[in-house]
């Protein structure tokens, strides 16, 4: 591949390439990356940026990691892909075993897929088919929380926040699901039973047609970057059992240590019936996701009408992705990540606190290696994105939220560059 001059690259991009949540032609700010190393992104124009986003929660150990590269190279020398129907291989089996070991105990079966959205689709289909297997085919709906985000495919979109998720645009194509009010009590707030009322009321009225509740435990990500009380998760687990519905937890963003626990549901001391993971699974190397279930669920399938679970992606269990994911999880186990996350948390709390005094700022919150500055008004991306780049950091705000979830390997001076950039840019407003 010959390299194009940067201006030609950007011009061709604007003409031909869609970006996430972008218009065509794309008029938003756009920067070309040449390479990435550790916590740095290096632009075609020469600037080095400290990455405050971990490429959307994924790149937890930094870019171009020698151990992940080596795992990929070793696997490529053997096979990059084979179909998974009727065939199996070392990387998929060993990764499944590892996931079963590190996730809460009742989760024993792993369904591999290519992206978080598909992991959510798989979880929802598993729940519907489970109830069908159990002679309750009317249980086909879902209960979820406002301010949630579960992906961009149709079933996932139907359980995203109805306002942020723009349900009205797709009104005639989306199944209408049940939305409980978003939990209002913050992570460290005083618990109040009233927070559960909306969730419980819906279950009382509609449990007969609900297959499962699905939500993000403790941290609501792209639907608002909100942190809520773990007691909410613990109590909804009880309610799901009482009303005979399954609990699906979406830990695609929170999984693998980001919140200070390996999985955010550990804050509540509970486990789901179905768990979705993705994002950080391969350490940002490539796309891979998984849906885990319990034996209680999986054992009903052989007796069901179909006799099998009706899903099977072409690239299921891709050996290259599985080999890299396995190495990424070994890497995570090889050092004291809890201490690192706590250090990042402490520093984010200290250094983002001054933002509270800025007139543009509504709230500052930090949990684990996630820092959020919520503003009163939406940011102007065309203005703010280049300002962050000028300050040598990569941040990608959305709406009224400026947030950072840096790689776990970030050093204190590098993190300070991010927090100072946030303060300085907001102080200029
Ligand atoms: C990102 C995300 C998804 C969707 O994952 P994709 O890989 O983008 O399809 C689903 N749920 C949560 C909580 C996420 O953060």
Image: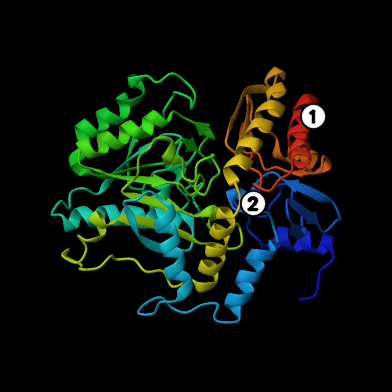
Q: Is residue 22 visible?
A: no
Circle 1 SS class: helix
Which quadrant of the view contains residue 43? bottom right
Distance between the alpha carbons at the discs numbered 1 and 2: 23 Å
Which quadrant of the view contains residue 133? bottom left
Q: Relative to 29, is 202 on the left or the right?
A: left
Identify the residue at horizontal 56%, vertical 82% (top origin): 78
Q: Is residue 291 visible?
A: yes
Q: Relative to 274, is 47 on the left or the right?
A: right
Q: Quadrant of the C terminus?
A: top right
| 45, 35: nearer the viewer | 35
Residue labelled with disc 1: 424
Does the residue tagged 2 have its C-beta within 8 Å of any atom of ligand 1?
no
Residue sitting farthest toward the bottom: 78
Identify the residue at horizontal 63%, vertical 58% (top origin): 18
In this figure, what is the number of numbered marks?
2
Q: Quadrant of the N terminus?
A: bottom right
| 1, 347: nearer the viewer | 347
Q: Relative to 353, is 183 on the left or the right?
A: left
Identify the residue at horizontal 59%, vertical 55% (top origin): 334
Residue labelled with disc 2: 55
Characterize the local packing of mark 1: few (<14), some (14-19) or many (20 or more) Cα atoms within 10 angstroms: some
């Amino acid at each position: 591949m010959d390299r194009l001059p940067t201006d030609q690259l950007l011009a061709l991009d604007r003409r031909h390439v869609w970006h996430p949540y972008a218009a065509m032609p794309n008029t938003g700010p756009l920067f070309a990356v040449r390479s990435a190393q550790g916590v740095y992104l290096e632009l075609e124009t020469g600037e080095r940026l400290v990455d405050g986003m971990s490429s959307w929660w994924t790149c937890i150990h930094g870019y171009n990691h020698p151990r992940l590269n080596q795992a990929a190279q070793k696997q490529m020398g053997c096979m990059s892909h084979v179909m998974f129907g009727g065939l199996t291989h070392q990387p998929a089996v060993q990764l499944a075993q590892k996931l079963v070991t590190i996730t809460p105990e009742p989760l024993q079966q792993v369904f591999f897929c290519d992206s978080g959205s598909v992991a959510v689709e798989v979880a929802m289909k598993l729940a519907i088919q489970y109830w069908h297997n159990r002679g309750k085919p009317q249980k086909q709906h879902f209960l979820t929380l406002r301010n949630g985000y579960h992906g961009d495919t149709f079933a996932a979109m139907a359980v995203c926040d109805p306002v942020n998720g723009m349900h009205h645009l797709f009104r005639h194509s989306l199944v209408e699901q049940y939305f409980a009010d978003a939990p209002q009590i913050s992570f460290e707030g005083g618990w109040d039973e009233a927070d559960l009322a909306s969730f419980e009321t819906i279950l009382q009225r509609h449990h007969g047609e609900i297959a499962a509740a699905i939500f993000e435990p403790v941290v609501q990500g792209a639907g608002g970057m909100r942190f809520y009380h773990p007691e909410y998760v613990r109590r909804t687990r009880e309610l799901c059992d009482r009303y005979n519905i399954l609990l699906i937890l979406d830990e695609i963003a929170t999984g693998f240590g980001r919140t200070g626990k390996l999985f955010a549901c550990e804050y509540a001391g509970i486990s789901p019936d179905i768990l979705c993971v993705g994002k950080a699974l391969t350490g940002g190397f490539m796309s891979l996701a998984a849906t885990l279930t319990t034996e209680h669920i999986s054992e009903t399938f052989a007796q069901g009408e179909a006799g099998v679970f009706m899903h099977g992606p072409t690239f299921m269990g891709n050996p290259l992705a599985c080999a890299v994911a396995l190495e990424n999880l070994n890497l995570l186990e090889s050092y004291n990540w809890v201490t690192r996350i706590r250090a990042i948390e402490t520093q984010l709390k200290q250094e983002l606190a001054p933002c509270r005094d800025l007139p543009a700022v509504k709230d500052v919150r930090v949990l684990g290696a996630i820092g959020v500055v919520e503003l009163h008004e939406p940011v102007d991306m065309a203005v703010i994105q280049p300002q962050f780049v000028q300050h040598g950091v990569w941040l990608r705000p959305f709406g009224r939220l400026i947030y950072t979830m840096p790689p776990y390997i970030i050093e204190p001076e590098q993190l300070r560059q991010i927090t100072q950039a946030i303060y300085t840019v907001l102080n200029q407003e």
